[in-house]
Amino acid sequence: MANPIITLTTDYGTNDHLVGVLKGVILKINPEVQIVDITHGVTPFDLLDGALAIANAYPYFPPRTIHVIVVDPGVGTERRPILVSGQNQYFIAPDNGVLSAVYEKEQNFIVRHLTAEHYFLHPVSKTFHGRDVFAAVAGWLSKNWQPGSMGEEITDFKRFGLPRPKEADGMLKGVVLKVDSFGNLITNFRAEDLPAGILEKGEIKLQVGNHAIGKLLPTFAGGNAGEAFAFVGSSGLLEIGVNKGSAAKTLGLGRGTPVLLNKG
């Protein structure tokens, strides 16, 4: 059997020792694990950003991958640590909604409150559950594959609805969900929200903030220098980009910017 895979998605950044400590805890419990960093650049304390990151990444991993997600502004409070058993993968995270987009993608899943404290490191820090709870549990799960031994099933777990476009006066009103590292503006419009045939026409009637976008292109290279255009990104969401440039800087826009789509 191949070595187990454990992924890490956090808002820790990489300037401090925190990510290295997570890996050390896991490897001390199970030296045979392969650890994969999805990202440690989640916007600090931003549950939506964390939810999007893990939801866009996990489907590309093999069955029985264990995903550790630590975006945890409520660390040390009464919020629960949880283990989610999906259709063929596992998720270990705080119960604060950071797995909301995973819940939307998974058809069947079981959520457990992690209460079996003999799987934790002790003493458990009030400020570093990533080390003492989440990483430790992931290490042990990769050895025993017994999620049922780690806590009781719960049904009152936290989740939030992801922002969806809304109809308004013949328009679809959406929003910029995030800005990626290239400066692309990622909206909450899915490909299926777009008018029929629009992808073939290459034209779109889009208002992003105070800027009108008229081109819908299949590739970055099709755009003129300094010109903002729309495209459907790899996650299936409509994005605004600039060829070899940053749409966020070019347009002076960012997360939360209103986006209007004329369906006519």
Image: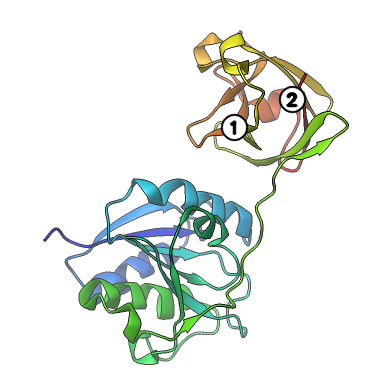
Q: Is residue 136 above or below residue 35?
A: below
- Whole-percent x and y of residue 183? 61, 31
Total residue callouts: 2
Q: Quadrant of residue 88?
A: bottom left
The kind of residue on which mark 2 rests is: Leu
Residue in the image at 61% along x and 85% along y: 78
Q: Which mark is residue 135?
A: none
Residue in the image at 46% along x and 63% along y: 69
The kind of residue on which mark 1 rests is: Glu
Q: Is residue 125 left or right of residue 135?
A: right
Q: Is residue 39 left or right of residue 33?
A: right
Q: Is residue 78 above or below residue 227?
A: below
Q: Secondary structure at mark 2?
A: helix
Q: Disc 2 versus disc 1: distance between alpha carbons? A: 26 Å
On the question of residue 155 being in view, the answer is: yes
Q: Is residue 29 above or below residue 175?
A: below
- Whole-percent x and y of residue 257? 77, 38
**Which image quarter holds the C terminus?**
top right
- Whole-percent x and y of residue 222? 54, 9
Residue in the image at 31% along x and 74% along y: 25
**Which image quarter holds the N terminus?**
bottom left
Crowd around label 2: few <14 · some 14–19 · many ≥20 (10 Å) = some
Residue found at the far left of this picture? 1
Q: Quadrant of residue 91?
A: bottom left
Disc 2 designates what residue? 251
Disc 1 designates what residue? 192
